[in-house]
Image (cartoon, rainbow, N blue to C red):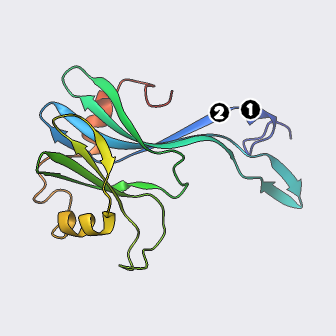
Amino acid sequence: MSGSAHGGTLHKDKVETTINLSQGYRHGDTIYFLADCHRYQRGRTFWFILPMNAGPKTLSHQTLLCALDAKTRTLKQETVLQDPAQLTCMVSYTKWALKDGGLFVAYNPSNRISPLTGHTEQIVFRRDMATGAVSAVSDPEKAHAELFAEYKSPYRDNPGIVEISEYKPLLPLGELTQ
């Protein structure tokens, strides 16, 4: 059966895109969020007693910090945080904190366990709210411990947190997939 849903000629050279979004952080009319964008071509399916799939071919994989103006519905890519991002990147557990004129964002760049803490590694970035400059925090383990020690839930004591379902309908169609 040619052109089956398992790859075959139907999907040959077709570029697929998956985008995983984080919860957002509202500051005024702007909602900041992370987008993990993976563009790939499906692997080929071949038969050897049972169907077997060769892995997909990654074309690009980036983790982006984005800003959405909730009033005008304009989307701005602030910066690329990781390029290429690791396949096991987890932006769904992103943590946000606004402190001393900086918006701090922490997320799991992979599923690696830190030898120091025994927890999944975190990477921390700081966006200067006055200049818009984004930089990696030099000691992410220490910064994460200081900023998020009392972080129990994204909803409690974090009034700026915005659910994906609240801001996703405001996103301009197709802008993240380009």
Could you say where residue 154 lies in the image, as x and y percent from the top left? 21, 57
Tell me, yes or no, if residue 169 can be seen here: yes
Query: Could you tell me which secondary element the residue under label 1 belongs to?
Result: loop
Q: Is residue 71 left or right of residue 117?
A: left
Point 32% across, 59% down: residue: 138
- Which residue position holds label 2? 15
- Which residue position holds label 1? 13
Quarter of the rendering containing residue 109: bottom left
The amino acid sitting under disc 1 is Asp
Please state which of residues 143 and 65 is positioned toward the viewer in this rendering: 143
Q: Is residue 41 left or right of residue 101?
A: right
Q: Is residue 45 left or right of residue 105?
A: right
Point 87% across, 54% down: residue: 47
Residue found farthest to the right = 48
Q: Residues within 10 Å of mark 1 (few under 14, many from 20)?
A: few
Quarter of the rendering containing residue 2: top right
Point 75% across, 42% down: residue: 7
Could you say where residue 119 lies in the image, as x and y percent from the top left? 38, 75
Quarter of the rendering containing residue 145: bottom left
Label 1 close to label 2 by CB (< 8 Å):
yes
Tell me, yes or no, if residue 151 can be seen here: no
Query: Could you tell me which secondary element the residue under label 2 belongs to?
Result: strand
Q: Residues within 10 Å of mark 2 (few under 14, many from 20)?
A: few
Inter-mark Cα distance, 1 to 2 = 6 Å
Please state which of residues 90 and 156 is positioned toward the viewer in this rendering: 90
The amino acid sitting under disc 2 is Val
